[in-house]
Image (spheres, coloured by chain):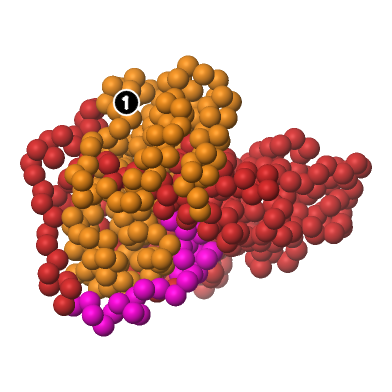
Amino acid sequence: MLTPAELVWLLAAVSKGDQAAFERLYNATRAKLYGVVLRILRRADLADEVMQDTYLKIWRSAGGFDPRLASPMTWMVAIARNRAIDLVRKKAELSLEEESAALEVAGDNPDPLARREITDDLRRLLACLGALDEERRRIVLLAYYNGWSREQLAAKFDKPVNTIKTWLRRSLIDLRECLGS
Amino acid sequence: MTIDQDKDVLAAEYVLGTLGPDERAEAQALIAVDSGFADVVRGWERRLGELSAMVDPVEPPADMWDRIKAGVAVSERSGPPPAPATGAVQTAQDDPVASEKPSISDVAANEMPSIFEAVPEPATTKEEVAEAAPQEEAPTAAGPAPVVEALKPAFIPLAVEPPSPPVVPGPPIAAGPAADADIIPFRASARRWRAATILTGALAACFLGLVVVQTTKPDMLPVALQPKAKLVEVVKTIEVPSAKPAEFVAVLQKDDESPAFLLTFDLDKRMLTVRRVGAQQQAGKSYELWLVSDKYPAPRSLGVIGSGPYTVRQAASEYDPVIINRATYAVSLEPEGGSPTGAPTGPVLYHARLTQTTAPEFPARAP
């Protein structure tokens, strides 16, 4: 794994049309991004499609990346997740019918990290998530990691969609307050 | 304060991914038009994005890089090269929110090469690949239908060149030397045949060209190739298969703070949905939606917007996707039931253009 600083340099080179840098960037980030989108889409063919889309987008808009506003990984992950969620919402029937399988696969908490990978920002976020009630913490994590809709969360927690909506709202407001701006 | 908080939660839920399709489209439209909202979204992408550190890496298929490279090559040929400054509208549907701030690239350019030499390759293991396989092995047949990309360049000229004079007329021409008296009607007849065949050929060529171009890349259709009005009538009866649904939105609003209507086009189904967001129903008045295109001398009515939260129409079916794409959409305030004249009579309150919310057509996979 490259350091964030190295990724910033690579993105800068990519924004100049440097294809070799683009390949290095791909090699450094492909497994993480694929892990993120596969977890949401759970179908290799769809994940492949999103990956191609994502890297094309990264190639085209690397110049729009601003290291003062985002880390390279959160920036790229956001591109990939947005594409994956757009797709999964369009295929709502798919994700719903496979829901039971997803419940088995999807733990709320993916793997523990090597110490060095826990950044200060992540540590703060985890602390703030930890301050939420358990159910409210879980809906945020399930939504983030698995791309679940409110309806899927409602089914999982056996609550009306409106309750989920309220929980989400409350959780996000609390998170915002806890993290500051 | 509450409005800020609503926006904040909308942005957060957009990033989290829990919005339904309509709200998601609304958020994407807001990102496109409201830079303040776009900043809030970016903030949430940064905050929540940290969670991705805990996702297990999974090796993508080995040929993925070749496919990406091919996609980049295609986009280089058909689109602009990556530009340091990306325009707000162009990138609005893409996330994360594009920054218009000065980019790092200028600063970085000079010292890059030395750094690249030292970049290590990421480690990959077979175990990861094995773990990566999704629970249900997805049949590749379920993937996107291959696009007839290879045909594209070949068919475009077809529509440009007038079809060569037909050989068909048969008997009259094949008859060879004949009495003058006979030749004249034959010639006239041949001319009629020829005219008819040219017309048919031209129609067929247009169709073929249109269908192929519409299927692959409507944007590539040059203005000169856009179907004449009378052709559109025929074209609409053809089911145009599309590899991916294309969806476009426009936010009809007076200012950044108060979107009034949200317009969504599903080009696949030629379906138009108007969602009432902030506009108030006025007694004895109706809102009417107009398509304004330089292809038409006057605005075309897309119908009166109903008083409910959603108005769904097939109204778009008679318009070409290219026209739909490039048109401006306007809402005027008309007497109840719509404009009595067929042209806008009341004040035009809102107007906007479309923004694509789905990913643009991605080229077919490399063979």
According to the image, label 1 marks what residue? A102
- Could you tell me residue B88's position as x and y percent? 52, 66
Chain with orange colouring:
A
Residue placed at 66% from the left, 68% from the top?
A: B294
Dot 1 amino acid type: Ala
Q: Is residue B340 magenta?
A: no
Q: Which residue is painted at 82% across and 57% down in the image?
A: B344
Which image quadrant is residue A28 in? bottom left
Q: Determine if the magenta segment contains residue B92.
A: yes
Q: Quick one: B100 or B88, which is closer to the camera?
A: B100
Quadrant of the snapshot with the N terminus of chain A: bottom left
Q: Indicate the secondary structure of the residue bearing disc 1.
A: helix
Is residue A7 visible to the viewer in this orientation of the structure?
yes
Q: Position of residue B304 (x, y in %)?
A: 77, 44
Residue B3 percent coordinates (x, y): 67, 47
Dot 1: chain letter = A
Q: Is residue B115 left or right of residue B360?
A: left
| Residue extending furthest toward the right | B284
Q: Decide if residue B249 is on the left or right side of residue A116.
A: right
Extreme-bottom residue of the structure: B110
Q: In terms of depth relative to the viewer, which is nearer, B225 or B102?
A: B102
Q: Position of residue B284 (x, y in %)?
A: 92, 42
Closer to us: B151 or B88: B88
Identify the residue at image location x=18%, y=77%.
B113
Q: Colour of chain B?
A: red
Range of residues picked out in magenta: B86-113
Comparing B238 with B178, the one in front is B238
Could you tell whether B178 is left or right of A43 in the image?
right
Q: Is residue B76 above or below residue B350?
A: below
